[in-house]
Image (cartoon, coloured by chain):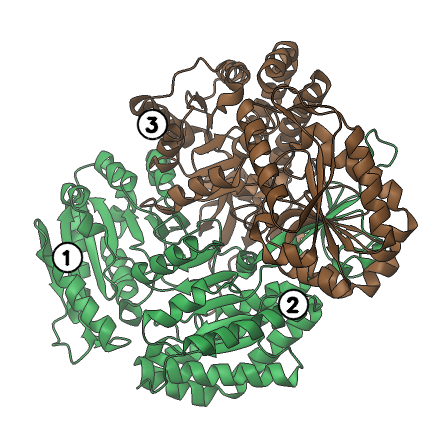
Chain colours: A brown, B green
Amino acid sequence: MNTFKDATTEEINAVMEQSWSAFEAYSTFPLRQRAGFMHAIAAALGSVSETVVATAMKETNLPEARLKNELNRTIFQLNSYANACEQGNWLEARIDTAIPERNPPKPDLRKMLVPLGPVVVFGASNFPFAYSTAGGDTACALAAGCPVIVKAHPAHAHTSEMVADAIIKVARDYNMPPGIFAHVHGAGFEVGRSLVTHPHTKAVGFTGSYGGGKALFDWAAQRKEPIPVFAEMGSINPVYLFPEKLKQSPVELAKLYAGSITLGTGQFCTNPGLIIGMDNEDLQQFITALGKAIEQTAPSTMLHPGIAKAFVTNRNKALMQEQVDTVAVAQQEPGANQGIPTIASATAQAFLNNPVLHQEVFGPYSLVIRCRDTEEMLAVATRMEGQLTSTLMATETDMRNCASLVEKVKNSCGRIIVNGVPTGVEVCLSMQHGGPFPATTDARFTSVGADGIKRFARPLCFQNWPNSLLPDELKDGNPLKIWRTVNNELTKG
Amino acid sequence: MNTFKDATTEEINAVMEQSWSAFEAYSTFPLRQRAGFMHAIAAALGSVSETVVATAMKETNLPEARLKNELNRTIFQLNSYANACEQGNWLEARIDTAIPERNPPKPDLRKMLVPLGPVVVFGASNFPFAYSTAGGDTACALAAGCPVIVKAHPAHAHTSEMVADAIIKVARDYNMPPGIFAHVHGAGFEVGRSLVTHPHTKAVGFTGSYGGGKALFDWAAQRKEPIPVFAEMGSINPVYLFPEKLKQSPVELAKLYAGSITLGTGQFCTNPGLIIGMDNEDLQQFITALGKAIEQTAPSTMLHPGIAKAFVTNRNKALMQEQVDTVAVAQQEPGANQGIPTIASATAQAFLNNPVLHQEVFGPYSLVIRCRDTEEMLAVATRMEGQLTSTLMATETDMRNCASLVEKVKNSCGRIIVNGVPTGVEVCLSMQHGGPFPATTDARFTSVGADGIKRFARPLCFQNWPNSLLPDELKDGNPLKIWRTVNNELTKG
């Protein structure tokens, strides 16, 4: 039970004033100091892991093993983004030295990324640790040099409060400016709107629903001074079954996907909600095997009653659409707030003609689209909205034979997987967790991996500065030994 | 005289359909082919330089030498961004290799930037070449792999048409897909709105007024699928005169700034429109010398009657504000459509209390702000809106003595110059031509320098791809020999 009161406007104003003061101090801290602070937060999370996991179990219904894993992932993110922060490649340091004898003289120009300012982070319901209070957005913002204001997700407000307390204690121990991290409760949308529209807020990070993310984006765009919002709003993550691959192993593919569809009660933004194949015997075998596996899967409890209710509503709405067949439903009766694993099927024509079938059903549900031929698969891919991921279950021959389909799919997603499942998002520099709208509000950024730091930073160019007054990152002699582009050559010299 | 008809909705739809087809082809072209196309456009501009410069002289009233310089700059931009395109650093290629024995197994992940899609570019009135038809935005978009649709600026529509013809001829000679480049006329805002709101448009580049840029931003944000707009909307480019520096050479500084304020009839987005100093004898000497120099400067013809009229209106509005003194006006009577060089002055309190004095007066005008002390200079800097540039006229001692002022100034601009003038924007990788709103709509990007390519590209992650089907940029063995980050290490290996 969330027993916290919503922050008042006065409280939010006070938080934002302090955050701005913290920004003016923290933005000048050396990379090493930022990294040290982040490593210390990671260590602090480790030391409170038992109590925060226990609290999160009560608030989210997620199993202990999953939450422990997620907390470890959160600690890993903090440590790895701290390392990236200190390594400094993300700064995009560039130097063009002066040519005084040129006519006109060329000035000395040096550029690096600097922090945007206070960042408001919204906790995600489905990741109480990794995309919440001390999660990826917070880690990226701190690495960039920005203070963070977290709006706790009301569904796990106590977990959030405990994590926030740990961060604030570390901040005090590390003599961080007061306001480097703030934690705000708000069950309704008013607190979120006050935070996003406050003049001192300079960027927003969000992971959640389309409705929530789009509201933040609109508020931010309508400010007197618009600010960037990176909202990851989920997607249906289409999986394309190519003919040769499907023929080779329809039953194995079905088992693989039954697992991916129901993993974590389907509560991942990379959950495969759409499977597209050519309507032939192989696809029928796949559908039959997928249906059997789903029937045997036990329903499990969803994150909170609101999500469970939305799953029932959206699933039923999808199943009620014309030309949609229910293929399989888990045989075990669902308990209270449990999501019942479900597979449906429809023709490509039905999908092409009905936008409802393009909408995410957040939970253990997937829709199989039956296409007459590869032309119809291409038509489905052409009509596809922006996605976080797309998956090709395909042999190399398949991919060569359907090259134009492969190209279409590339143009509508942020990550394109061959012969795997979209669930499971590796934390590393090569990851792209983002994608064309409506998957996110800006396809040019990621919320996973250290490149996510760049969401919260902007280039600042120093022209004709005395060397001694430049930031260390840009000084002659490269005292920090970071990679820099000097007169168009990448060098550590 | 612009004798072209506005494009109709049907024409725009046809252009955008063709542009989308071109995108699907061009986005797969190798970097070398994109670069070759851009070099060829540069060469073609060189071969038509006499006729396009002659036409631009008639349309813009700009002198021949300036236009020749600007055309050379445009050619340089195309060539240097083409080189950057082929060099491939901007792709941010990252590879994390698989660790199959890990539990769970780590997949192979590879990421690079890919083009967003068709880019609409709006020609700028004050740069008929460098920020118009074949200008920086066009060069960046082509390098990124995006087709371009240019909306010609009506004030130099014939120049734009000639440059467009040259590009289209090159595109044909190079077997580029039809639609790789399109040119559209529109005197009113309807054509611009149709282009920005078309579903096939995926990004917008603009250089011009706040009103124009903000309208594009709003249209783009209100689309069903919002798209990024990089609008560079000018600024007042504050210049801070620090006490020791001012004492050393008030008259020389005044002469330097008289030149910068009136360069190109003040029609640069980096024109120094605000000069801030402490009210003492040194500042009085500076103001007197600046006034004398401005009185001796001959009025010159502005780009077009609309800009000349706006200058008169905005200048008179500024001079009419309470507590604003007119310091100097050019003695020579202005002719038709000429901008009359003008210097005004006001106290810091007047500036702090009157938002009108924060607004750009596009033309040969600057306002000197007299502060009682450094505290008041700090108050002015604190209240400053986002700027393309800020300039510190300061000794090293000044900068150390007023460190908090220096930090404030850093937080409100994209480029910070020491002991120089903001006019003159070097084309190189270290340049940042952008800044916090309202200078631009997204401070995280630049419109000058090859980093501007990134405005029009997004990361795409390839998971578990067969090596032979990956783009060459990401293949094992690095066939293109570009810099890539492999398992967190930058390498060409």
Q: Decide: marks 3, 1 in contact (CB < 8 A)?
A: no
* Secondary structure type for disc 1: helix
Label 1 belongs to which residue?
B318
- Kind of residue at badge 2: Glu
Q: Quadrant of residue A16?
A: top left
From this viewpoint, which residue is outermost toward the top? A51
| Chain on which label 1 sits | B
Q: Quadrant of residue B320?
A: bottom left
x and y percent of residue A142 in the render? 53, 30
Is residue A163 left or right of B11 when viewed as pictured? right
For label 2, the crowd category at 10 Å Cα-Cα, with few meaning under 14, some 14 to 19 and many 20 or more, is: many
Disc sitting over residue A17 in the figure: 3
Label 2 belongs to which residue?
B24
Tell which circle, 2 or 1, labels the residue nearer the N-terminal end: 2
Who's the residue at 43% across and 57% down the image? Answer: B220
Q: Nearer the viewer, residue B204 or A368?
A: A368
For the residues marked 3 and 2, what is the alpha-carbon distance in whole angstroms? Answer: 48 Å
Reply above or below: A245 against A13.
Answer: below
For the residues marked 2 and 1, what is the alpha-carbon distance in whole angstroms? Answer: 50 Å
| Residue B482 visible | yes
Q: Quadrant of residue A127?
A: top right
x and y percent of residue B77 in the render? 53, 69
* Secondary structure type for disc 3: helix
* Secondary structure type for disc 2: helix
Who's the residue at 19% across and 60% down the image? Answer: B290
Q: Nearer the viewer, residue A479 or A32?
A: A32
